[in-house]
Image: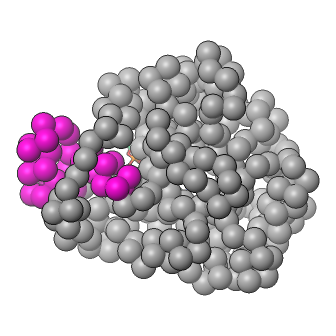
Amino acid sequence: MTYLKLNDGTRLPKLGLGLWQVPNDVASFVVTGAIQRGYRLFDGAALYGNEAELGAGIRAADCPRDQIFLTTKIWNDRQGFDQTLSAFDESEARLGLTPDLILIHWPCPQRGLYLETWRALVRLREEGRVRSIGVSNFHADHLVRIIGETGVTPVLNQIELHPRLQQAELRAMHERLGIVTQSWTPLGGGRSFDAPPIRAIADRLGVTPAQVILRWHLQLGCSAIPRSTRPEGQAENLAALDLTLTDDDMAAIATLDAGERTGPDPMLVG
Ligand SMILES: NC(=O)c1ccc[n+]([C@@H]2O[C@H](COP(=O)([O-])OP(=O)(O)OC[C@H]3O[C@@H](n4cnc5c(N)ncnc54)[C@H](OP(=O)(O)O)[C@@H]3O)[C@@H](O)[C@H]2O)c1
């Protein structure tokens, strides 16, 4: 595993396993197997409904807790100061573990509560209840507001990012502010697997399109959290850590940006 340094001094494994839509009856087994294959970062959320299985899978693995990086997220209907504190307690109880990182899942600007939600995460960190705090799906003005009001910069912003949605402006802002960009749906629904630049690079290197795309994320300086419930899919994705793309490869993939989301616009999620 290779790591990124967060702005609070902790280290984040660059590549992790996403838990969205991982069915409850296999989630624990999938997580334990992923740890055996070398995964050290797990991306969960209250919304995913499998925090209990995620925690059980980590506890069942033969790996010291301090080598695993566990993320979970506050769901939209628990925004607000007090609600967030109790949602954190509930996630911790379901996981049976203290998460290393807690994120605000979406800013939900219509609710008008993301600043108070952020203040609650700051409180949890000040009290030593959680080591790292961050956000997800935040736009530039949401970041400016929470940092301006609290003086606390999130360690990362987890955003939709893949070759058809490259988020160059937001990534540049993150870099200026010392925020890690973490890519969700990093494989972009497979929509770029057959794009000529991806195919050409994959053929030249003798690897798969998914590996080329994951390597592209890592070379952009992002963390990525692809989901695969298949052992061979997990191993394939992890092996992206060992590839190298040239500057020309990176430039060729840059041409695929189409500003095209697979998920909703964060401004519209309520
Ligand atoms: N913060 C947010 O709002 C947000 C939103 C969406 C997602 N996320 C997080 O991001 C994680 C990843 O996103 P995602 O799950 O939407 O999509 P993804 O990881 O980009 O893609 C997952 C899909 O690709 C397949 N796949 C995985 N590896 C593959 C490979 N090497 N070759 C071909 N197909 C492959 C998987 O099927 P198999 O299982 O069969 O391999 C699955 O159908 C989520 O699990 C979640 O943790 C966060």
Q: In the image, residue 39 lies at what x, y percent?
A: 49, 31
Report whether 38 appears left or right of 267: left
Q: Which residues are magenta?
A: 192-219
Report whether 155 appears left or right of 146: left
Image quadrant where residue 237 sits: top left
Figure check: 46 above or below 36: below
Does the stretch in magenta take in 146? no
Q: In the image, residue 103 lies at what x, y percent?
A: 67, 57
Figure check: 181 above or below 236: below
Does the stretch in magenta take in 200? yes
Figure check: 240 above or below 79: above
Image quadrant where residue 260 sits: bottom left
Q: Residue at x 71, y 44 (%)?
A: 100
Q: In the image, residue 157 lies at what x, y percent?
A: 57, 64
Q: Quadrant of ligand 1?
A: top left
Q: Foreground residue, 39 or 73?
A: 39
Q: Is residue 265 visible?
A: no
Q: Residue at x 29, y 65 (%)?
A: 164
Q: What main secondary structure does the magenta stretch of the protein show?
A: helix
Figure check: 195 above or below 13: below
